[in-house]
Amino acid sequence: FKLVGNTNRCFVELGAGVNGGNSGFLAEVCGWTGLMVDASQSRADRLVGRFGRFGVSVERAWITIDNVNDLVRDNGYAGEIDLLSVDIDGSDYWVWNALTVCSPRMIIVEFNPAFGSKRVVTVQYDPAFDRSDYKSLTMHFYGASLAALARLGRIKGYRLVLVEPRGANAYFLRSAVGVDIPATS
């Protein structure tokens, strides 16, 4: 954000876990506000305890393509926001594709490195998809490949600019944001 600036210091974190995901630091240290959503009641309770005092809204919800826009809009984050982070361990691609009520300047989305970086692959959409249902078979059945997310990003007007060194998160900028930062393959 030092390179691309920010507008309203607002975020939406889908799949916040117990630490606030990619937005926890922004809320706790940098004074940002936003929405954190997690499917687990115990994690949502911990998020309220940790981030509620910073003005962060927390929702306990199983995120689907059918409810994601309502979750964002009903919590006051429709329109332009600075950051959208999607880490729901399964239907990340489909939820990002369905999300239309907000226009993030930057998007961080988890990808599945086991699918490789060249093939356009995603798990089929299932509103009840739970990665833990497949762990007895494989740890690698979830989400989408980097190539799938990069293609979706282009369709939605974003460019891939960075992949986290440990290979879990991909960073996208909206086309008109940080124009001096080049896209990466």
Image: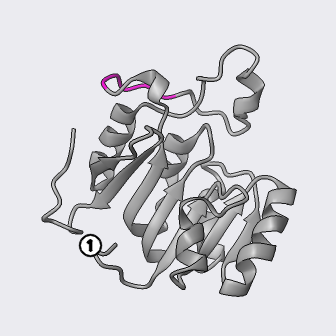
Q: On the picture, is 48 further left or further right than 116?
A: right
Q: Is residue 105 visible?
A: yes
Q: Which residue is mark 1?
A: 4
Front in this rendered view, residue 113 or 122: 113
Res 148 → quadrant? top left
Query: In the image as oriented, which residue stretches furthest toward the top?
Result: 137
Q: Position of residue 53 (x, y in %)?
A: 73, 86
176 relative to 170, above or below: below
In terms of secondary structure, where does tag 1 sit?
loop
Q: Is residue 121 magenta?
A: yes
Give the position of the C terminus as an image quadrant. top left
Check disc 1 and give the amino acid type.
Val
Q: How is the model colour-coded?
A: one colour
Direction from residue 74 to residue 167 in the image, left or right: left
Q: Quadrant of residue 115?
A: top left
Image location of residue 161, percent across then percent down: 26, 51
Q: Relative to the observer, which residue lies in front, 60 or 102?
A: 60
Estimate the x, y position of residue 87 in percent, counting from the top left: 57, 49
Vertically, is 130 above or below 118? below
Question: Relative to the observer, which residue lies in front, 156 or 32?
Answer: 32
Residue 66 locus on image (x, y percent) = 64, 52
Q: Residue at x 48, y 51 (%)?
A: 96
Q: Is residue 10 left or right of residue 52?
A: left
User: From which residue to which does the magenta span run?
Assistant: 118-122
Residue 55, magenta (yes or no): no
Q: Residue at x 12, y 65 (%)?
A: 180
Q: Quadrant of the N terminus?
A: bottom left
